[in-house]
Amino acid sequence: MELTVAGFWIFSTLAVLSAIGVVFFRNIIYAVLSLISALIMVSGLFFSMGAELVGALQIIIYAVAIVVFYVLVISTVPEFKGKAFEPKYMLISIPVGFLIFLELAFVSLYGAWKSNTGIFTPDVINEVGNVKAVATVLFTKYLFPFEVASLILLVAMIGAIILGKKEHVIDEEAKS
């Protein structure tokens, strides 16, 4: 039990430090490397809590696929527009960030009280396994939201590629 608590504190501290790096690094490459580090630390949190499937999916989906997609977009756009932040956006971003923080705090606290309800008790999860329990819920009760989320991600990816290509064509025409 003590090893789990120590792992939690180590992984959570490193995840928070990496997330701070994502926000405050001015070099986009350092920010992406910090993002990879934060995602791997969150995966370590899942492993330390016994959620092996979610930890593995965190590494496969986020730390590999999404970060590769970010690097592709960064390398596709000729001059990445997000090199530095503009102070005028701070007036909007600070209150919005605070509201998002309040929402996450509420959901976390409410979820802590409600986490022991449902059909999958710890005894059932130990009996059938973590992977089967997650797969059963995901592909029965939450199949439609799962498919909608995949469709939204596909549309976002196509939109990002089209926007990146459109700016590239405009830049090439301007140079001619």
Image (cartoon, grey):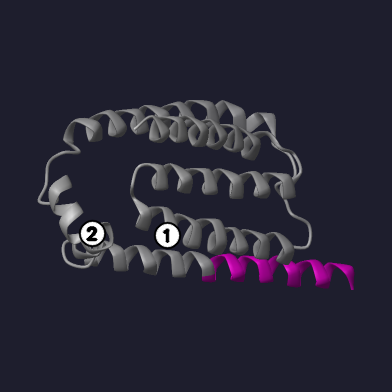
Q: Where is residue 151 in the image (x, y as percent from the top left)?
A: 38, 69
Q: Main secondary structure of the magenta part?
A: helix
Magenta stretch bounds: 158-176
- The three-letter code of the residue at mark 1 reads Leu
The quadrant in which the N terminus is found is top left
Q: Where is residue 66 in the image (x, y as percent from the top left)?
A: 54, 60
- The three-letter code of the residue at mark 2 reads Gly
**Residue that protrudes farthest toward the left in the picture:** 119
Q: Nearer the viewer, residue 113 or 80?
A: 113
Residue 167 is covered by the magenta coloring = yes
Residue 132 is covered by the magenta coloring = no
Q: Where is residue 92 in the image (x, y as percent from the top left)?
A: 53, 30
| Disc 1 to disc 2, C-alpha distance | 16 Å
**Residue that protrudes farthest toward the right in the picture:** 176
User: Which residue does the image show at 48% across and 61% down from the upper left?
Assistant: 61
For the residue carrying disc 2, how many other residues have a C-alpha within 10 Å: few (<14), some (14-19), or many (20+)?
A: few
Mark 1, residue position: 57
User: Which residue does the image show at 53% across and 71% down from the upper left?
Assistant: 158
Badge 2 element: loop
75 is higher (above) or lower (below) than 17:
below
Nearer the viewer's eye, disc 1 or disc 2?
2
First of labels 1, 2 by sequence position: 1
Badge 1 element: helix
User: Which residue does the image show at 15% across and 39% down from the upper left?
Assistant: 116
Picture quadrant where residue 172 is located: bottom right
Q: In this view, does 72 lie to the left or right of 155?
A: right
Q: Which mark is residue 129?
A: 2
35 is higher (above) or lower (below) than 63:
above
Q: Position of residue 152 (x, y in %)?
A: 40, 64
